[in-house]
Amino acid sequence: MSAEVIKVKHVMKPDVDVVDGMMTVYEVLNTMKHKQNKSIIVQRRDEHDEYGIVLLNDIATEVLGKDRSPERVNVYEIMTKPVVSVDPEMDIRYCARLFKRLGLSRAPVIENRKVVGMVSLTDLVLKGLCKTD
């Protein structure tokens, strides 16, 4: 008897804010649709480019902590690029191992070079291990 495989697509958040890298931190924070998300995906410039990511931690340390004006800092200046992503079909156990190995707390879920969601350690544990009725 084998255990049910829980995939990333079963636990990810489908609502992700994707922004242009030229936007300022101020603009991004004021236009975020999904305030509960702790990260922002930076759009690819073209089909050959890669996505970037900005964590709220990056904004806290690179803007707030360095006393920089959010109106004068563009998102591309503080993003991490390329972003490490996961496939929606990945088993959550492998996703957790990848996060541990790379020191990640979250990653975008990308399918066919399009962002389809975001998954975090919290999602893996609370949605992946806790049975819901």
Image: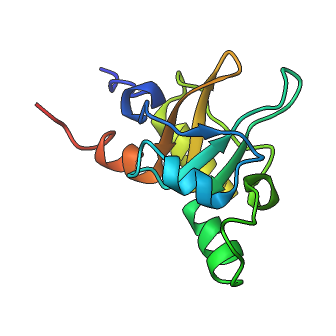
Left or right, 7 with reference to 25: left
Residue 89, given in percent of the width and then of the height, sits at 53, 21
Quick check: can you spot residue 103?
Answer: no
Residue at 47% x, 31% y: name it: 8
Residue at far left of view: 133
Q: Residue at x 71, y 83 (%)?
A: 66
Rendered view: 70 above or below 6:
below
Colour setting: rainbow
Residue 114 in the image, given as x and y percentages of width and height: 65, 22
Q: Is residue 126 left or right of residue 15?
A: left
Task: Give the quarter of the figure containing the C terminus.
Answer: top left
In x, y percent, where is residue 76? Answer: 79, 52
Relative depth, front residue between 46 and 112 = 46
Tell me how many marks there are.
Answer: 0
Of all residues shown, which one is farthest toward the top? 112
Q: Quadrant of the N terminus?
A: top left
Q: Splitting the image into 4 quarters, where does residue 130 fall?
A: top left
- Residue at the extreme right: 48
Question: Can residue 53 be seen in this snapshot?
Answer: yes
Quarter of the rendering containing residue 82: top right
> Quick check: 92 above or below 126?
above
Give left or right: position of 67 versus 5: right
Residue for point 51% across, 47% down: 31
**Vertical placement of 83 versus 48: above or below?**
below
> Residue 105, image x and y in percent?
54, 56
Q: Indicate left or right for 52 with 95 as reference.
A: right
